[in-house]
Image: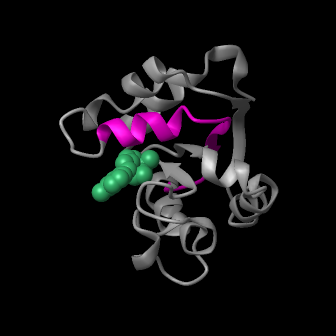
């Protein structure tokens, strides 16, 4: 089991001014920040990042939204990082997210859901390497 996961604070949460509150909740939950940047995905980069969803009906909307404004991308470290982070952020659909989770507090809809969290150790590495290179890690 790996101890890293990858997250993005999505354009909706950045626009709403929630970067600080979300990072605070993440570090309060015991995650250490290994790499982090404030950046914006181009449409092509968003398409590539979400390539696994290319066949889904929401793919176009997802790519459009994820490239619509700046994001915070970060690599987080903690024991059992992938599963614990998914617990912290809550269900993909904020309507089904447990009280106190990041999505329950800050997300608007299943599409504009405030944060991303990797769904497996394998994808955490792929996603971290998509955004960061060796010298970005501390
Ligand atoms: P994320 O964890 O970043 O990974 C895939 C994203 O697709 C997911 O968060 C949602 O934001 C988005 N997504 C999943 N289901 C839907 C849907 N039905 N409509 C719009 N977006 C969706």
Q: Kindly indicate the quadrant of the structure image that contains residue 35.
A: top right
Residue 72 seen in render: yes
Q: Is residue 1 above or below residue 124?
A: below
Pick the front one: 80 or 35 = 35
Q: Is residue 43 above or below residue 78?
A: above
Residue farthest to the left, as pictured? 55
In-image side of 9 versus 67 (left or right): right
Q: Is residue 92 above or below residue 82?
A: below
Query: At x 72% / y 34%, what residue is drawn?
Result: 36
Residue 77 seen in render: no
In-image side of 28 versus 45 (left or right): right
Query: At x 38% / y 36%, what residue is drawn?
Result: 123
Indicate the position of residue 66 as horizontal and vertical percent values.
51, 38
- Name the quarter where the C terminus is drawn: top right
In-image side of 5 versus 105 (left or right): left
Q: Kindly indicate the quadrant of the structure image that contains residue 99.
A: bottom right
Query: At x 73% / y 57%, what residue is drawn?
Result: 16
Indicate the position of residue 9 as horizontal and vertical percent values.
63, 47
Pick the front one: 85 or 99 = 99
Segment colored magenta? 59-80
Coloring applied to the structure: one colour
Q: Kindly indicate the quadrant of the structure image that contains residue 30.
A: bottom right
Tell me, yes or no, whether the highlighted magenta stretch contains residue 61: yes
Indicate the position of residue 111 as horizontal and vertical percent values.
42, 54
Pick the front one: 135 or 97 = 97
Query: At x 66% / y 54%, what residue is drawn?
Result: 13
């Amino acid at each position: 089991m790996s101890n890293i996961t990858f997250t993005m604070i999505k354009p909706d949460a950045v626009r709403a001014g929630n970067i600080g509150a979300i990072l605070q909740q993440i570090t309060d939950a015991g995650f250490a920040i290994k790499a982090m940047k404030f950046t914006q995905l181009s449409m092509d980069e968003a398409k590539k990042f979400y390539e696994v969803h290319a066949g889904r009906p929401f793919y176009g909307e997802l790519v459009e939204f994820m490239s619509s404004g700046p994001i915070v991308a970060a690599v987080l470290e903690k024991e059992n990082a992938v599963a614990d982070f998914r617990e912290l952020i809550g269900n993909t659909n904020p309507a089904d997210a447990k009280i106190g989770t990041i999505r329950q507090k800050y997300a608007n809809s299943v599409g504009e859901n405030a944060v991303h969290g990797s769904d497996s150790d394998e994808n955490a590495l792929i996603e971290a390497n998509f955004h960061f290179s060796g010298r970005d890690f501390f």
